[in-house]
Image (cartoon, rainbow, N blue to C red):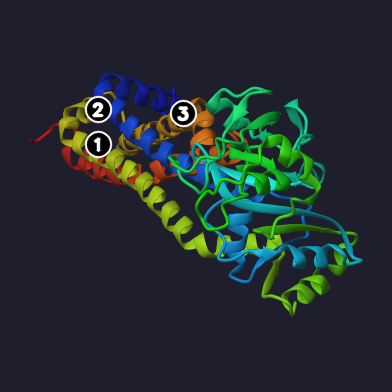
Amino acid sequence: MTWLGPIPHLALRSLLNRRLTAGLTVLAVALSVTLFLGVEKIRLGARSSFDNTISSTDLIVGARSGAINLLLYSVFRVGDATNNISWRSVQDIQQHPDIAWTIPLSLGDSMQGFRVLGTTNAYFEHYKYGRKQPLSFAQGAPFKDLFDTVVGAEVAHSLSLHVGDPLIVAHGLGNTSFALHDNLPFEVAGILEPTGTPLDRTVHVSLAGLEAVHRGWESGRQKQTGEDADDLRSIAPSLEPASITALLVGLKSRVATLKLQRQINEYQKEPLLAIIPGVALSQLWDVVSVAERALSAIAGFVIIIGLMVLLTSLFTSLNERRREMALLRALGARPWHIAALLTSEATLLAGVGSLLGVCLVNGLLYASAPIIETHYGVTLNSLAPGAYDGLIVLLVTVAGFILGLLPAALAYRRSLADGLTVRL
């Protein structure tokens, strides 16, 4: 029988004999692979979540500031607008012959830490996310009454809301507010299906309803107007906002996108900015790409550290195993058999460790995916091991084999020098 057959088996039995040291080495490699793949999967999940937040919207119009800033506060509910768009300008834009639909957005209020968005029923008709997926309702329907509200899936889950429940909006942002619109409560009319986007954490109200609860707040403090909910319902058609935060625009033909963008950017009545969502998103990734690369590099160094632990373990065990090597020589093993044994051990440790790391990262992400989505808005689309995981396992295993050549070369030289007698 040749030694090429028994060597892997012998390497496995040798590792089992040193199970504590081998187990700790495998764990070090597994944890390093877990951290690396975890960072990569969450990074890709975050990018995918951002990319899938809005689709089929050709232009976003806001006050002139920066493209990334406009994208962040209008789509991702991050930050605040530097200024608003006047309602007169909105009406001018809506009359453009190339425009098929518009969705006005008005931000500024909150509800127990969730952003409140004023809009119209066009939002539920035309807004799309992911791969042009329309919004759908888990319960209820869009606005019908002045004080109807539609909440995202996470809002409903976190606050245990159901259709028909009252909801009080707070003036301004923050988790805690002492300026509540409690004199005019809203009522939950609908709950959206989960989307994995900021919509899940948004409370949607009608523009007219938002205008109604702000009557008397023109000076920044509430003044009694003597109007109750029924009075405001009677004048609902006249409740137009003086300004809004942003405007989503869909065109009849995308060929006109650049032309309309230039016309809006050159609008004379007030300074406006029109951005193409995909272009602005690319600019956002350019800004954060340095941090992404740095994070990936740090995770990659962790794998290197794990492999260094493997190499240290093999070198440390060499002196302790010189009698074992001499015994193998006495049984007929040649020096290269000794080298092959150590290389096989290194390959087994790296391979088993990387496989365990893949299992760990996918198991941990599967268990924590709902928490990550709820608290950070990152949807992890694919939690099953894929080709990338297999590639990492292969690369780590090959790296283990290459690193194993170093102690194997040393063991080869010692085996030639020691012969059958070990001089310690």
Residue drawn 58% across and 64% down? 68
Of label 3 and label 1, which has the lower sequence position? 1
Q: Quadrant of the N terminus?
A: top left
Position above or below: 74 against 316: below
Tell me if mark 2 has few (under 14), some (14-19) or many (20+) residues whose alpha carbon lies within 10 angstroms of its own. Answer: some
Q: Residue 242: horizontal and vertical position, in percent?
A: 69, 60
Quickly name the residue at label 1: 313
- Front label number (3 vs 1): 3
The quadrant holding residue 419 is: top left
The reply, left or right, for residue 102 in relation to residue 218 is: right
Dot 3: few (<14), some (14–19), or many (≥20) neighbours within 10 Å? some
Label annotation for residue 21: 2
| Callout 1 crowding tier (Cα within 10 Å): few <14, some 14–19, many ≥20 | some
State which tag comes first along the sequence, 2 or 3. Answer: 2
Task: Please report whichever mark, 2 or 1, sits nearer to the chain's N-terminal start.
Answer: 2
Number of dots carrying numbers: 3
Tag 3 residue = 364
Horizontally, residue 305 falls left or right of residue 147, namely left
Above/below status of 396 relative to 246 = above
Instruction: Look at label 2 and name its amino acid.
Output: Thr
User: Residue at left 51%, top 49%?
Assistant: 172
Q: Amino acid at mark 3?
A: Leu
